[in-house]
Amino acid sequence: MTTSSINGAKKKKVAIISTGGTIAGSGRIGEAGMYTAGVLPVDAILEGIPQIRDQIDLDMISVCSKDSNDITPEDLFAIKEIAEDLEYDDSVDGIVITHGTDTLEETAFFLNLILNVSKPVVMTGAMRPATATSADGPMNLYQAIALAANPDAKGMGVLAVLSDTIYSGRDLTKVNSIKTDAFEVGDPGPIGYMQDGNAYLIHSPYRRHTTYSWFARSVPDHLANVQIFYVHAGCDPKLLQYMLDHYDGVVLAGSGSGNYAKDIQEVIENYEGNCVIVRTSRLLEGAAFESPVFDPKRKTIAAHRLSPHKARILLLLALSYNMDRDRIARLFKEY
């Protein structure tokens, strides 16, 4: 286990890229339930942690001020451009990205695939708006800044700090809509923990990311249209057929280990078009593997441990670069 602190001989500099979200939300003073996301500037949140400026120099950069459900691919590629410029700025030691928690895991995985950055990149957000009693944003931001200034976080891809825990951008998942401790990673476990400005790192991400990612090399000319079909008892096979006929890729959010009913299987086995189908599990833990029972004709690609929405991102990028099916299947084993 590696332990390190923000207190050192040389004062560090961290760039904060803001996108809005609950961490910048404002509502009735003291209340956490009713608020508008993305209203306040990061400076307002930093007022709750004035000591941070004595320890670390901060550079503020705003990309947008949105609810995270409104984040677009254009926003994400704007972050890529800014972060890659900061990679070559010798005065900057690390990068923090503030973001709403609803889609933080999707942005974290997307950036983990497209950023050509080796400096620490740490995302954070909040479950309570800045105007709530016991708002969690200031501590999350403090710890994210501390981790971004920590050289031990270099080369680990996109990380996230929330509720004293360090997560891999590939693995974290939001599992609770109310509690401040709202994220989990399932089987892999967290990257480490924070206590105030001290980082306790346990392990390093293994799968390809950032500078090791094929997608970090360039920006695609277009983005493919990939959607998710959610499997449940009684789901309509005609809806799946429509999606296969109209989209470049479809991700099946299957039950169990990526399973589905016989009428869904019939649609898949009879499909002869160009839409690429990926099988995932809708569960937090476990995986979707190749299955001779549910996919005897090998019409689908197994997503292994990627969630439906993260599998969608990987498939979207692969199709945007016109990769063939065999290459895409290998990606799900590499990323």
Image: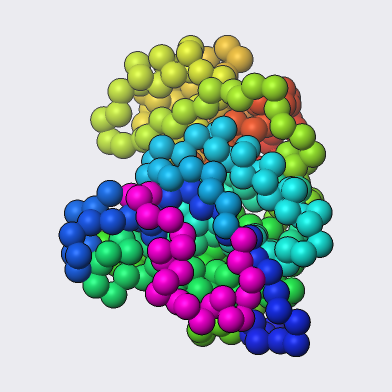
**Residue plotted at (58% across, 81% down):** 54
Whole-percent x, y for residue 123 in the image: 54, 59
Instruction: Examine the structure image and report whether residue 136 is included in the region drawn in magenta.
Output: no
Whole-percent x, y for residue 67 in the image: 37, 44
**Quarter residue 53 falls in:** bottom right
Q: In the picture, which quadrant includes the N terminus? A: bottom right
Left or right: residue 213 versus residue 187 is right
**Residue plotted at (50% across, 74% down):** 142
Which one is nearer the viewer's eye here, 58 or 7?
58
Left or right: residue 26 versus residue 103 is left
**Quarter residue 129 falls in:** bottom left
Q: Is residue 185 visible?
A: no
Which one is nearer the viewer's eye here, 163 or 301?
163
Placement of 205 over or under 266, stated as above or below: below
Placement of 264 over or under 193, stated as above or below: above
**Residue plotted at (35% across, 16% down):** 238
Whole-percent x, y for residue 259 in the image: 43, 39
What stretch of residues is rendered in magenta? 37-59
**Residue plotted at (62% across, 44% down):** 79
Which one is nearer the viewer's eye here, 195 or 46?
46
Placement of 222 over or under 37, stated as above or below: above
Whole-percent x, y for residue 83 in the image: 68, 50
